[in-house]
Image (spheres, helix red, strand yellow):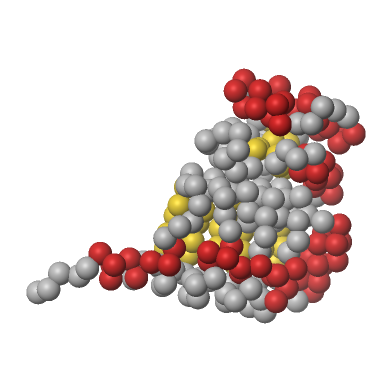
Amino acid sequence: MPRRSPLTELEGVEDLHISSNAGLAGLDAFPSLDLLILVACDPVNTAQLSRCKSLSTLEARLTGMSGLEGLVGLNLLSCYVPQNCIRDIGPLMRIERLRNLDVTGNPLSEHTYNVLIPELRKRGCRVIMSERFEWGITCRFHDAGIPISCYKNKVDNRDGYRLGTVGLRFTESPHFEHPYITTSQAEALAKGDLRHAFSHFEHDVAQRLSEALPS
C-alpha cells in the first residue's frame, strides 16, 4: 500500500491548535481546517486566514490581533476572540452565518460597543462582551499604547478583576500571567495613573510595561 505524503496528511487536518508562535506562516498547508485555535500568537494578520475556506470556528486570544478584514470571505459560525486589540468588528457584520461571538477584553470603539454589537444581537448572534466598567479600563490602557486587558474571570469566587498583557511584546507567556485586582483597585485605574497596575505583574513584565508607557 503506497504511503501518503506528509503534505496530503496536512491537507486533511480539520482541527489545529497553535500556541506562543510568532505569526501564522504555513497555514496554506491546511485547506480543510474547520477549527483553528490561536493562543498567544503574535503578530496575527487575519489576511493569512483568507484561504481557510472551510473554517467554521476561530478561537484567538491574547494574540495582538487588531483587524478582522481577512475574515470577511469565510463562512464562520463562531468567532471567539477575547483579549486581543480589536476595536472595529465591522467586517464581521458581513458574515451572515455568524452566530457566536466573544470580544471580551478588547478595546472596542464606541461605535462597535454601542451600535454594531446590539445590531448583531438583533440578527440572532450570541455576543459575549465586557461590561462597560472593565471595557473602559481596557480602552484606557490601549489608548496609552499599553495592550492590557481588564476582565472579569468567572472562575474567581470573589469580586474583582484580572489584568492580562496581550501578545508577546511584554512576556513569552501572556496566558499565564493574569494578576488579580480588587474592585477598589480597578476603580482607581479607571481614573488614575495606569502605572499603579504594573506592580501587580511579575518584576520583569512590570519593568517592560513601565518603560513602554510614555512619561
Q: Is residue 215 visible?
A: yes
Residue 149 falls in image quadrant: top right
Could you tell me which residue is drawn at 63 percent across and 49 percent down?
64
Residue 165 vs 2, above or below: the answer is above
Q: Is residue 69 above or below residue 154?
A: below
Q: Could you say where residue 98 lies in the image, as x and y percent from the top left?
A: 65, 73
Direction right: furthest residue: 191
Q: Is residue 168 left or right of residue 32?
A: right
Image quadrant holding the C terminus, namely top right
Q: Quadrant of residue 161?
A: top right
Q: Visible in this render: residue 181?
A: no
Residue found at x 62% / y 20%: 203
Q: Position of residue 148 (x, y in %)?
A: 70, 39
Q: Position of residue 109 (x, y in %)?
A: 82, 56
Give the residue furthest to the left. 1
Give the camera-side residue of 43 and 179: 43
Instruction: Give the total number of marks visible in the rendering.
Output: 0
- Determine whether 12 is above or below 60 in the image: below
User: Could you tell me which quadrant the N terminus lies in?
Assistant: bottom left
The answer to which image quadrant residue 174 occupies is top right
Residue 108 left/right relative to 78: right
Q: Position of residue 108 (x, y in %)?
A: 78, 54
